[in-house]
Amino acid sequence: IRPNIWMASNFPLTIQQLNPFIELMTMGNKNFARLQEIINMDLPPGFPVRIEIPLFAFLSAQVTFGHFISWDRTTTSVTLQQPAFAVP
């Protein structure tokens, strides 16, 4: 069973920037260890904006990066839209 990965060439984040977060999450969840294996594979250029990982033959997990907001030191607040937290 293979993962499905959607790549974006113009995403404002890199895999190297994401790795410390994934490493931290692997301490508490073995599925994040699988995610870390996938993003450290020899992927095509770009950033994986969507990853679908098979957990069992009948169940898969999906990680999607959408509505990304890049903050800098001058950002004081951000208003999120309701759909950002909608559960499908």
Image (spheres, rainbow, N blue to C red):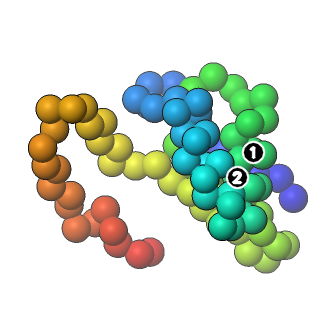
Percent position of residue 79, x then y: 15, 55
Residue 9 in the image: above or below residue 34? above
Residue 17 in the image: above or below residue 57? above
Let me know if residue 48 appears in the view: no
Please give left or right for residue 63 compared with residue 34 in the image: left
Which residue has dot 2 on it?
A: 35
Which residue has dot 1 on it?
A: 38
Question: Disc 1 vs disc 2: Cβ atoms closer than 8 Å?
Answer: yes
Q: Amino acid at mark 2?
A: Leu
Please give left or right for residue 71 compared with residue 55 in the image: left
Percent position of residue 63, x then y: 56, 57
- How many discs appear? 2
The residue drawn where x is 46% and y is 32% is 13
**The C terminus - image quarter:** bottom left
* SS at mark 1 in the image: helix
Tell me the quarter of the picture where residue 39 sits.
Answer: top right
Let me know if residue 77 appears in the view: yes
The residue drawn where x is 87% and y is 59% is 1
* SS at mark 2 in the image: helix
Please give left or right for residue 23 compared with residue 40 in the image: left
Percent position of residue 7, x then y: 58, 35
Distance, label 1 to label 2, CA atoms, is 5 Å
Q: Amino acid at mark 1?
A: Ile
